[in-house]
Image (tube, rainbow, N blue to C red):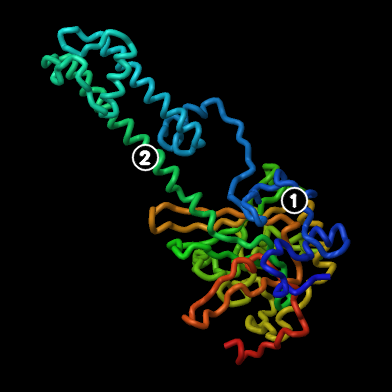
Amino acid sequence: MRRPAADLSDDEGGYDKKTSTDYVQGGDEKHGNAAAHPSKCRMIDRSAGSNHSLGTWNIRRLRASDAYKRYLSAPFHTLVNMSVYKVVIGLSLVYLTVIAVFGLLYLSIDSSCNLAIATFPQGFIFSVSVLFTIGFGVGGNDVFFNSCGSAITLITAQTIVGVFLDAMAFGIFYQRFARGQSRANTIRVSAFACVQKIRGHLYFTFQTCEMRKHQLSEAHVRCYAVLHKSVHFPHQVHHMQAYPMRLQQPDDDLNGWLILALPTICVHRLDAWSPLAPPPLDPEPTHNPATQALFPEPPQRAVDIESGTRENKYRVDKPALFNTATTNVLTPVTKADIDRLLRFWSDTEMEVVVVVEGVDAATSSTTQMRHSFKAHDVVFNEQFVNCVFIDNETGGAIIDFKHFDRTTPLDFAAIPITTPREAV
């Protein structure tokens, strides 16, 4: 038996949930079984804790024969994207090599230059002093080295090399610590997605919000469905391929702009162009590109025809466009609909990849947050619980992220009937 989400205490890490896994396996209400769906089956990880993602792609690449030549053509970007220990070891080896080479060169300088270097350890220590400007001490009691040209040339050359090495090391470490991927860890996307039926159409919804008080500039969202090759997509060449998902909220015709300061519900309709929708049970005998999807035609949105922003010239009887009923807005997703969706998602091993992007104002770097939903992360006939409250002292908003991932069953009997006047 599910308990109301509002009754859960803060220390309860989970709550009863009816996911798509439960519809397939049956049984009591419960969480989707993580053991039955290991992380290796996902394209995007869920290893950030609380069933959230670090945005890591589960992709292993077999390099081409000329891969290293291409990587070395952009050495800075290659170093920046290496792991930290590789960067530290690599830079340390470069510094040690420079120190050792110049230490050997100092050994070759004539004794008349008063460097007082007779052994390699002495040359190595002197090279360290030059490279890191520690100071020369009083080795030969001559800080000007008898105005010797060879000593002055070597010291100047090593100093210049050291400046370039320091600049490269600083740039690499700054880019690693300031890169946008780490900044993306506080952009939250709900752990579960909801499928609801609104005015007779199925909608896939999730929500996103920023946990920091410092917001991203020009934040926007995109969605893709990663599908495995199946009989439903005979044109698909690769075993796995990503298909774009059109969004109605926020409108992707307006670039899907977001204000991440407050939770935003993102809505995708499962229409004819949706990669999440199974093929129609009764397909039309002839193809109508205004109402049907067929590769390689661009993905459209059914709502554009319904709202009059895109014309369907193949409409024979030309019915009125704006005749959508405003009553019974929300109706239950039927068991037949759920079975069809889950069967199709199982055949294609569906995974929805969510990409939230924006520019960090502090570093001017582009930040990309990645998250994904598998079939067992989807719940039906549920909605997200309220996690935004009013601060009685300031009149502002309070966002409780402890409730951000929680959903509750839709109470269809309590849903008010919306009239056209109320909708305005």
Amino acid identity at mark 2: Gly
- Disc 1 secondary structure class: loop
> Residue 107 is drawn in which quadrant?
top left
Q: Hey, which residue is sitting farthest left in the picture? A: 147
Q: Against 257, is 34 above or below?
A: above
Image coordinates of residue 235 in percent, x first then y, are: 69, 47
Residue under label 2: 171
> Residue 375 is drawn in which quadrant?
bottom right
Image coordinates of residue 311 in percent, x first then y, are: 59, 73
Image coordinates of residue 133 in percent, x first then y, are: 25, 29
Residue at position x 16%, y 11% from top? 113
Residue at position x 44%, y 53% from top? 366
Residue 349's mark?
A: 1
- Disc 2 secondary structure class: helix
Left or right of 155? Residue 320 is: right
Amino acid identity at mark 1: Glu
Q: How many marks?
A: 2
Q: Against 366, is 316 above or below?
A: below
Q: Against 34, is 422 above or below?
A: below
Label 1 neighbourhood size at 10 Å, few (<14), some (14-19), many (20+)? Answer: many
Foreground mark, 1 or 2, reads 2
**Residue 292 in view in this figure:** no
Quadrant for the C terminus, please.
Answer: bottom right
